[in-house]
Amino acid sequence: MSKPSRVSMLDYCKYILQCVSFDVRLFRKEYRKSIRRLNPQEVTHLKEWVRLQVTNKSIPMKTHSILLVLIGVLFTGCSIVRQGEVGVKRRLGRLDNETLQPGPVVFNPLTTRVIKLQIRTMNMEISSSLPSKEGLNVAAVISILYRIEPHKAASIIETLGMNYEEVVINSVFRSAAADVCSRFYAKDMHSAQRALIEKEITDQMARLIQGRGLVVEAVLLKNIQLPAGLARAVEEKLEAEQDAQRMEFLLDREKREAQRKMIEAQGIRDAQKILSEGLTRSIIEWQSIEAFREMSKSPNTKIIITDGKTPMLINPQEN
């Protein structure tokens, strides 16, 4: 068989297949090449041509049997939808409304494509400059946790596209963050107000993207950097507050010490008053006798002379 002088790609593929029809391996190899080179309409024509050739005995039956299996394999595609994903079929440019669950998906690769979307919680990190109530810009790194509603995967692809993070999530966050942060002072982003700011941004984003198939779970403010002047002012204020608390502690301690001494003095005064009121002459004489008795036991005492009223100690060396 002579090669035509001027042929189309389809005719050329037919010519090659006829030349290698004697060898199954070569025929299968060239047939695959032909499928890749031709458009879908030409492929359909080629299949019909092969069928006619087999009917007319131009191609051996053994080659024909293998060819039928090969055609079935080439015209059947398979894709795996994994856990945490859903799939959507796009057939001839149109999206199916059915959401494909995890598992194998069989489709025609010439007319259909399987588009996969993640449905697990995703983390989108953004570096942004947040405006404050006093007109300052606070640099911060923000994490946005969001996920896709599985049953709205086709709607997301159709209305938002595959770049929905930049189209919707990023744009909506910058708008909501600018609106919420402008109602708070810069120092509030370092205080307990941070949780309130995060919640208000999350709620506002949820309202803006409601019904689009995206769910914002949380907005987290991280690595907040205040302007240098404001940071120093905040540090100085904190130091002043700590000094004031320290002075309050010292004053409170001194007040408690003064109260303690006052109570102690009052106790001594009351004790002396009670003792003075309870002393009688008999008690004083008895105490004197006890004192004399103790003095007599002392090794330094030699002679004790008394008139019964006042004791007197006399050193015998002076006599």
Image (cartoon, rainbow, N blue to C red):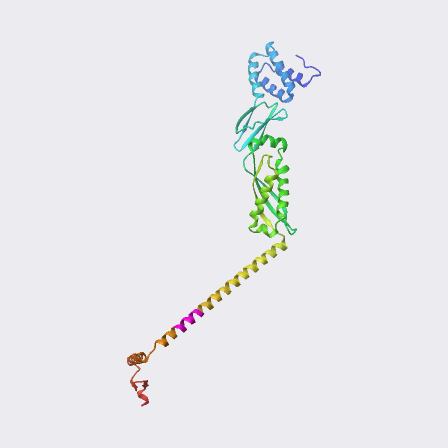
Q: To which quarter of the image does residue 18 belong?
A: top right
Q: Quadrant of the C terminus?
A: bottom left
Q: Nearer the viewer, residue 33 or 91?
A: 91
Is residue 157 something one can see in this rendering?
yes
Question: Residue shown at 61%/31% (left/top)?
Answer: 157
Question: Residue shown at 61%/57% (left/top)?
Answer: 233
The answer to whether residue 175 is magenta is: no
The answer to whether residue 265 is magenta is: yes
Relative to residue 267, is residue 223 depicted above or below?
Answer: above
Q: How many marks?
A: 0
The percent coordinates of residue 102 (x first, y second) are 52, 29
The percent coordinates of residue 42 (x first, y second) are 65, 18
Give the residues in magenta.
262-270
The percent coordinates of residue 23 (x first, y second) are 58, 15
Q: Nearer the viewer, residue 250 or 85?
A: 250
The percent coordinates of residue 134 (x first, y second) are 64, 52
Q: Residue furthest bottom?
A: 319
Relative to residue 250, is residue 232 depicted above or below?
Answer: above
**On the rendered structure, is 271 left or right of 253?**
left
Q: Nearer the viewer, residue 204 or 218?
A: 204
Q: To which quarter of the image does residue 303 belong?
A: bottom left
Is residue 16 something one can see in this rendering?
no
Q: Quadrant of the N terminus?
A: top right
Q: Main secondary structure of the magenta part?
A: helix
**On the rendered structure, is 277 left or right of 97?**
left
Q: Residue furthest top?
A: 56
Q: To which quarter of the image does residue 12 belong?
A: top right
